[in-house]
Image (tube, rainbow, N blue to C red):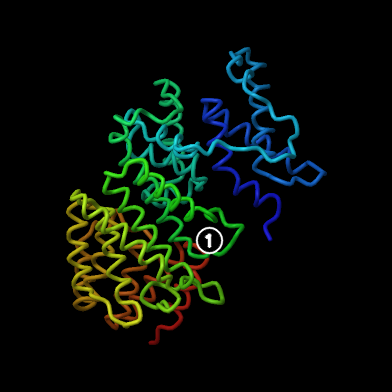
């Protein structure tokens, strides 16, 4: 059962989205939320609805701040006030909702691409700067700077906190989709966070799925929106098989496929079929196709690795990133032999990937499969030193200790 501090953390993304939509100032929204959290932790009376309590308290704190700074508050003050802070309040739920509106705001074309996504992940999804930095192969200080610059840009450019007209959605939807995809990948990496209510990423996967579905309703002709929905459904179909009884991560190749959710697999297949009919190929659809290929082996103990390699070849042409290249190398090792996968890894920019955990994990696994146990053990040690998520660390330590010789 999560305590009050955990409930406050879980409420953060939704409350800040609602505050920012009204205050039109991201820094003020975050500062007011932090002050409200401190007040909540000092509150002696039980708080029935932490999110509602935080929203009302933070809104009042923000208005006080604006008044003290002698800023215009008439528009905000004219809005109806909620008298009882303990009562449940109704967040705006009309399509598009507050979180989606703020996503479109953060993904304004005037903001640099990576900064848009980082800002959205931090402010809207509540992902820590450390996890965002890891996803973008950079450091925490560098990521803090990007997020700060993005906030300044929103203020200086007077970007409105509202969903743009539908004619402008096409210029922002790509970044919105990439933000949600990155959030999903962060949840996927933190396998234990799927089951732990106190985890920072708890509840994020269902929210990505909800927003993906909402986007398909708003933009039914956007193939990649259907691709994201397919990808999310297929990834979530394996949630029940991802963590062992002792909390260790179970990789895809070792999962009990009987625990996969057949209904979600079918939903993913249907969403991908819808995307395909629109004849607008994209990376999200290709990723979904890779996951669907894995799902088709459910119950048969067989995976069409050759098809997966071909799909990764297509994806690499669309998205030539280290993550795609590493995953392709792993698929190549499974479809041919470990030597082929290692050769593909060795062809990458090792200098840039020296501290990239997925690279080290993939290399350790392929070295072990190739019988090069001494080198594999060293790679596992390097990977464990890179501070993996707890569930992944348990799995990597187990793999390392299982090596003989």
Q: Secondary structure at mark 1?
A: helix
| Residue 90, picture quadrant | top right
Residue at left offset 65%, top offset 46%: 8
- Residue 278, above or below 333: above
Residue at left offset 64%, top offset 19%: 77
- Residue 291, above or below 297: above
| Residue 145, picture quadrant | top left
Name the one closer to the observer, 297 or 349.
297
- Residue 304, above or below 206: below
Q: Quadrant of the C terminus?
A: bottom left
Task: Name the residue carrying label 1.
Answer: 193
Question: Residue 348 appears at what percent x and percent y?
Answer: 22, 59
Disc count in the image? 1
Question: Residue 138 appears at what percent x and percent y?
Answer: 38, 47
- Residue 151, above or below 182: above
Residue at left offset 51%, top offset 75%: 244
Name the one closer to the observer, 38 or 102.
102
Name the one closer to the observer, 318 or 163.
163
Name the one closer to the observer, 40 or 73.
73
Around disc 1, counting alpha carbons within 10 Å, would you say few (fewer than 14), some (14 to 19), or many (20 or more)? many
Side of 380 where 347 appears, left or right: left
């Amino acid at each position: 059962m999560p305590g009050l501090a955990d409930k406050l953390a879980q409420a953060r993304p939704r409350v800040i989205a609602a505050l920012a939509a009204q205050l039109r100032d991201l820094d003020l929204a975050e500062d007011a939320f932090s002050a409200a959290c401190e007040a909540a932790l000092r509150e002696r009376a039980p708080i029935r609805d932490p999110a509602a309590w935080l929203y009302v308290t933070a809104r009042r704190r923000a208005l006080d701040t604006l008044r003290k700074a002698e800023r215009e508050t008439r528009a905000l003050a004219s809005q109806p006030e909620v008298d009882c802070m303990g009562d449940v309040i109704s967040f705006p739920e009309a399509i598009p909702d507050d979180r989606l509106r703020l996503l479109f705001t953060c993904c304004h074309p005037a903001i640099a691409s990576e900064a848009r996504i980082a800002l959205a992940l931090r402010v809207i999804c509540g992902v820590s700067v450390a996890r965002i930095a890891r996803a973008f192969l950079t450091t925490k200080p560098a990521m803090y700077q990007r997020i700060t610059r993005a906030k300044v840009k929103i203020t200086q450019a007077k970007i409105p906190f509202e969903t743009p007209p539908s004619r402008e959605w096409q210029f922002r939807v790509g970044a919105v989709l990439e933000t949600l995809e990155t959030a999903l990948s962060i949840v996927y990496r933190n396998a234990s966070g799927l089951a732990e209510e106190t985890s920072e990423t708890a509840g994020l996967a269902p929210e990505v799925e909800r927003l993906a579905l909402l986007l398909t309703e708003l933009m039914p002709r956007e193939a990649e929106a259907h691709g994201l929905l397919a990808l999310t459904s297929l990834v979530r179909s394996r949630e029940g098989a991802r963590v062992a009884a002792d909390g260790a991560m179970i990789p895809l190749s070792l999962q009990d496929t009987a625990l996969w959710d057949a209904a979600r697999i079918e939903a993913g297949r249907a969403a991908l079929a819808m995307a395909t009919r629109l004849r607008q190929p994209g990376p999200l659809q290709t990723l979904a196709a890779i996951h669907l290929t894995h799902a088709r082996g459910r119950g048969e103990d067989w995976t069409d690795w050759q098809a997966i390699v071909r799909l990764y070849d297509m994806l690499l042409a669309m998205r030539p990133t280290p993550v795609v290249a590493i995953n392709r190398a792993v698929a190549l090792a499974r479809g041919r032999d470990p030597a082929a996968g290692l050769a593909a890894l060795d062809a990458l920019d090792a200098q840039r990937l020296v501290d990239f955990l997925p690279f080290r994990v993939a290399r350790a696994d392929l070295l072990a499969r190739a019988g090069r146990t001494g080198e594999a053990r060293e790679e596992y040690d390097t990977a464990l030193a890179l501070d993996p998520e707890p569930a992944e660390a348990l799995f990597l330590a187990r793999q390392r200790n299982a090596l003989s010789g």
